Image (cartoon, rainbow, N blue to C red):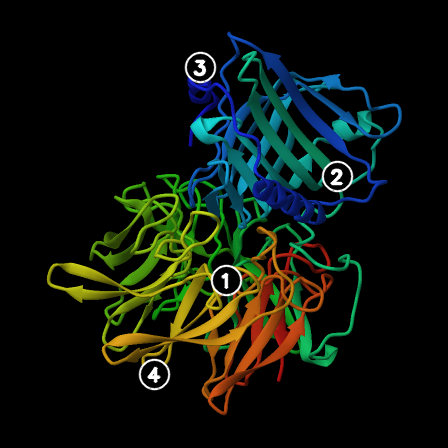
Amino acid sequence: MQSKKQFCNLISRIVSRAATAALATAFVLAFMATQAAMFSATASAQTVTFTYNLKCSGNCPPHNLGVASAVGEPSDDLVTIAAVNSNVPGYTTPVPINGGSLSWISSPASIAFIDPNSDVDATYSNPGGSASIVGSVFGLPNGSVLLTGSFQGGGNSGQGDHGWSPSYAGGTDISYINPVILANLGMAGLPNHGTGVLSDKWTVDPVSGIETFTVSVTFTPGAQCASGLGGSQSLGWTAEHSAGNNNFKILHNFSAAGDGALPMGPLTIDQAGNLYGTTQQGGSGNGTVFRLRQVQSDWVLNPLYTFSGGNDGAYPVAGVTIGPNGILYGTAYWRGSGDFGTVFSLRPAPQAPKTALVAWSETALHSFAGNDGVYPYSNLVFDRAGNLYGTTLTGGSRGGGVVYQLTPNGAGGWTENVLYNFPSSLYGGPDGANPYAGVVFDKSGNLYGATWVGGNGYCFFDTDCGTVFQLTPSAGGWKENVLYNFQNGSDGANPNGLIVDASGNLYGTTALGSGTVFELSPSNGGWKYSLLHSFTGNGGPYFNTGSGGPYGSLTMDQAGNLYGTTLQDGSYGYGSVFKLTPSNGGWTETDLYDFSGPDGANPWGGVTLDSHGNLFGTTAYGGAYSCGVAYEITP
C-alpha cells in the first residue's frame, strides 16, 4: 500500500490520464448497482453523516489513505472528521467537531486486479476490520467516542497507475453512535446502533495540482448487522422453500451481543452431539467462540470465549477443530502480538462449572509476525502425531501466503514450521497464491489444498484463477506439485477447501460466477479433473459474472453423497444448501433449502453431518437480528 504523501511525490511526473475505457465503465456501473443493493436504505430513513472535505495545493497536510494493491492487503486511513449533520429537516446544517478524527482499517482484499486503464482495483468479500470516530461536539468532552463500527463484506477500492486517485468505499456495521449526537440532530430515542457506509477518497488535478480529500461515514439506525449480500427480495419477506418448513429449524439467532455476530465458519460436532463454532464479530466487537447444546427439543447457546482484540487475536473466520483431548483449536485472522492473526486453543475449566456461562480458558499458541504468515483464515487439521496444520492468506518469505505446521515443543508451547511459501504478486505465480482454505491429508501423509489465485488461467483482466496443489514430505522439506490450474471456463475459478475420500479422490468447489463442484482423481501418474455440477442461479457482486457460488468445503456421507452451501445462489439470492448424489456415471443435484433472509442469509461455511443424517450450519447474515443464524436441516 502507498500513502497519500507518496502519491503526491509522483504527481510531478504525471501529465495526463487516459480516459476511462468503456469496459471499465461498464464494470464500475455494474459494481455500483450491486453495492446500492447491498447497502441500501429506504428513502425515508433518517441518517447521520460525518464528513471531511478539503481542497489544497502545495503545502497540504499529511494524509495516509492506503488502499490494497494485492490480494490479502487491507486498506486503512487516519483522517480528520470536521462536521456532523443529519437529514432530518432543521438539522441538515453541518455542526463542527472539535478535534475530530476517523481511524479505520478494512478486512484484507479478496480480489485485486488491473483494469483496462492499468489501474489497480480491489474488492473485499469478507467482513472484518474496524472504524472509530472521536472528537468533541454538542458539549461532549475532548476525545469522546462518537462512533464505533466494523466492516461488512462487499467493499471496493481503487488506485490509478502511478498511485493516483486512491479511494475506498464499503458498508459498516455500527455498534455504537453517541446518543448525544442523535439527541441533538432530531433523532432522539432511535437505536444508537445500525449500519452505514464509509467512503474515503483522494484525487488531484494533474494540471492545477489542486488536491481534494473527501471522507464521509453515514449512519442509519436499526439492526446492527448487515442485511446480507445480494438477494431478490427484502429481508422482511417470508416464502415457502423447496425443502419444506418442517425440515428446517433455526437453532439460534445471533444478536451481536454476548452471543456474537456473523458466524462464517462451519460448525464442529463432538461425540455428545454438541455443536461448536465461531462468530467473526460481536461479543466485545472482536468475535466469539460458542457452543450449542440440545436441551430436550431446544438448543441453548453458551458463549465460551470473547476475543479482546489483544494478544489473543480478533475476528475468527474459520470453525474450530476438536483435539484428541477435547480441547478446541482455531484461528483468529487479526491482531495477536504480531498483529497478523493467531492460532489459539480453548479448554474448559479444570472442574465442571456450576453455571454453563463460565468462560473457557484461551491460550494463544502462535502469533503471526509476517515472514511466517499473515491472516490465518483457515480451519486447522491434526496429523497422527498431534501436530497442527493450516494456511495463511498472505505473508511468508515470498508474500503470497504459507502452509504451516505447529508442533508441541514439550515445554507446554508450540513451534511453527513453514512448510511452503507462495509467491506474491497481483497475478499470483505458477504455483498459486493466497490460500483461503486449509489443507487435508491423504492416507500417505501428503497434504492437499487450493489457492484463490495464481496458476496459468486468466481471470479479471490480468489475474490468474487459482490452483489445487499437493505437498509431499521429503528429506529436504515439502515439495509442491500443482495438480490443476483453473481456467475460468466451465471449470470455474477461485477454488475453496478440499475434502478427500477413502480412495484418495479430491472434491472441491469454486466461487467465481455461480460456482462449480469438481473432483480430482489420481490417474496414470497424474490427476484427472471432472466437473460434477455447475450452479446456474444468482451471481454475486463482482463484475456481473457473480461470485455467489460455494465458499465453504463439502461434506460427504457414508453413501458418497456430497453436501454444501452457496453464498448467493437459490431462489432468493441469499444462498442455498444442496446435495449431490452419484447417479448413472454422473451427479444429480438436489436443492435442500433456499434462504430468504428472516431464516438466514449467505452461508459462508459448509454444513456438518451427524450420525443421524441431520445437517447443521450457519449463515453470516439474516435471521431475527440480521446477524446470522445457526440452523438444522433434517432428512
* Category of crowding for the residue at label 2, using alpha-carbon neighbours closer than 10 angstroms: few (below 14), some (14–19), many (at least 20): many
Give the distance between the C-alpha atoms of the residues marked 2 and 4, in whole angstroms.
52 Å
What residue did someone put label 1 on? 353
Tell me which residue sits at (57%, 61%) in the image. 302
Residue type marked 4:
Ala
Name the mark nearer the viewer: 3 or 1: 3
Horizontally, residue 450 falls left or right of residue 596, namely left
Amino acid at pointer 2: Thr
Q: Secondary structure at mark 3?
A: loop
Q: Nearer the viewer, residue 374 or 75?
A: 75
Residue depth check, mark 2 versus mark 1: number of the one nearer the observer: 2
Determine the residue positioned at 34% across, 58% down. 390
**Label placed on residue 220:** 2
Mark 2 secondary-structure assignment: strand
Earlier residue among tags 1 and 4 = 1
Asked whether disc 1 touches disc 4, contact meaning CB atoms under 8 Å apart, the reply is: no
Q: How many tags in the picture?
A: 4
Q: CA distance from mark 2 to mark 1?
A: 41 Å
Q: Is residue 268 visible?
A: no
Residue to which mark 4 is pinned: 502
Could you tell me residue 323's position as x and y percent? 36, 67
